[in-house]
Amino acid sequence: MLTRLAITDFAVVRAAELEFGHGMTVVSGETGAGKSLLVDALGFLCGQRADAGVVRHGADRAELAAEFALADAPAARAWLADQEMDEGEECQLRRVLRADGGSKAWINGRLATASQLTELSGLLVEIHGQHAQQALLSRTAQRSLLDDFGRHGALLGDVAAAARRWQIARDALDELNRRGDVSDRIELLRHQLQELDAETLDADSIASLDADHRRHAHAAELTAAQAEAREWLAESDEGNALTLVQRARESIARVVDHEPRLKDVASMLESAAISLDEAADTLSRLSDDLDIDPDHLQSLEQRLQRLHALARKHRVGVEGLAELKQRVGEELALLENASTRVADLEAEISAANIAWQTAAAKLTKARQKAGKQLADATVALIRELGMGKADFRIALESEPDIAPNPHGAERVEFLIAANPGQPPRPLRKVASGGELSRISLAIEVAALGIDTVPTMVFDEVDTGISGAVADVVGRKLRALGSRCQVMCVTHLPQVAAQGHAHWRVRKASDEGVTMSAVEHLDEDGRIEELARLLGGANIGDAARAAARSLLGDTD
């Protein structure tokens, strides 16, 4: 449940802070006062794309914050725990929109992405905007609404998975068929694989070959350098390193008893002598192992030449020949077994198609059931909203039998007959503006019964209705407020009177600049605001009496 919304330097709002409780909260105000800005701010906190244009003129940034109590949002609690952002029974969303177009967001004080805001807010709040009814004219939106109402997520997943399997197998078969006669390709691949098989291409073997070639190619230099090093280390009669270090050690050993600190020096000289002796022995062994064999060197060079020639031929590096060999082998195996592979793919396509038909049939049956339930509930609400003879149906139209569709076997179409004797026609073709407002509101309210989101926001969804119909709308929203938290931006007194709490947005002048101010209304304030909504700018006793009557008529 939304408990607090704070706004700073947002559009024409310098600063505003609203607190919310259970039930239905109403927001009203003069046209242009900025009452829908509260919904817009909540939208940005829910991950809507950043817009630098909403930063108040003259300010560097806009700051938005919302707090939610999570007692009625177990799914949100689970999401926060999974993301390691859980802070107990409350959750805070914060977002900063900069005038240069940048933005940052935080969830419980931790930096978050816009997608994380969207995921979390989808478990906390649902916003129905002024133009939500236009979305209902789309068949895609109608299908999604029906599937959401019927909770068809698992069935849709089965249908989509079968359709994907079918498409993958179909694409693979098409690729094989596009190849046509591949006998020439098979012969080429066999020749290439034979060439590659003749060489040892693994990385260790190539590295060993390169090292062996280097050793033999530079054998003369290695022999001379090792001989010279042995001479200086241990073999020179004129004074080698080992002899000099041993003499130094002997000199220190004669006087070490007179200076204990020389023990460390003696120890270091002894270690140096041992290391020099070992180095000389190692050089001797390496010299003995170095076999200068011109024939072996030639063999190594020929192997390297063959490898580099293969690499140039196939336009890869020598180190890429092993991977090339694997690819050639895999393609050859695929083509040589093409007839078997075709049969396997055809079997996969058939199996996937059968799986899709089975899953799609289950989805169709579920949609038929959910469609009747949603249509019946919508008809009842439409008739309460002043369209007493209207009929509403949800039609499922079979898609052409071309290929498995990840969305199912049918299209969904909302149909309406506004008057008796008329056949139902698509909603997008027949509904007038006022009728569309009432129908869309009825559909939304009917579909909301199964929603698990704890906070519902309605931004002037009552546009286009008035009078007794507006009273019914207000009562329906108030009744909805008994099941979840409702926030409603409205201009209708009949709807505003049904709220459990009421906030008013008004224009205010701040140093010659028009701003929006938000205030919580007590009972007297509500009477004045309802009287304004009823009678306009000139509020009289009759308007106040009517306002009191409206407030007294709430359940």
Image: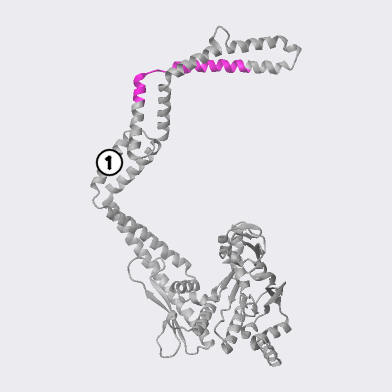
- Magenta region's main secondary structure? helix
Q: Residue furthest top?
A: 237
Q: Nearer the viewer, residue 376 or 272?
A: 272
Q: Is residue 422 visible?
A: yes
Q: Element under label 1?
A: helix
Q: Residue furthest right?
A: 258
Q: Mark 1 is on which residue type?
A: Arg
Q: What's the residue at 44%, 67% (across, down)?
A: 156
Q: What's the residue at 55%, 72% (across, down)?
A: 451
Residue 186 coordinates in the image, percent (x, y): 26, 45
Q: Name the quarter where the C terminus is drawn.
A: bottom right
Q: What's the residue at 59%, 59% (across, down)?
A: 102
Write the start and end of the magenta stretch as one range.
271-300
Residue 306 is covered by the magenta coloring: no
Name the colour scheme.
Answer: one colour
Q: Is residue 555 visible?
A: no
Q: Nearer the viewer, residue 165 or 41?
A: 41
User: Is 490 left or right of 191, judged from the image as shown?
Assistant: right
Residue 297 is covered by the magenta coloring: yes
Mark 1 lies on residue: 190
Residue 393 coordinates in the image, percent (x, y): 44, 81
Sort mark 1 into few (<14), some (14-19) or many (20+) by Cα contacts within 10 Å: some
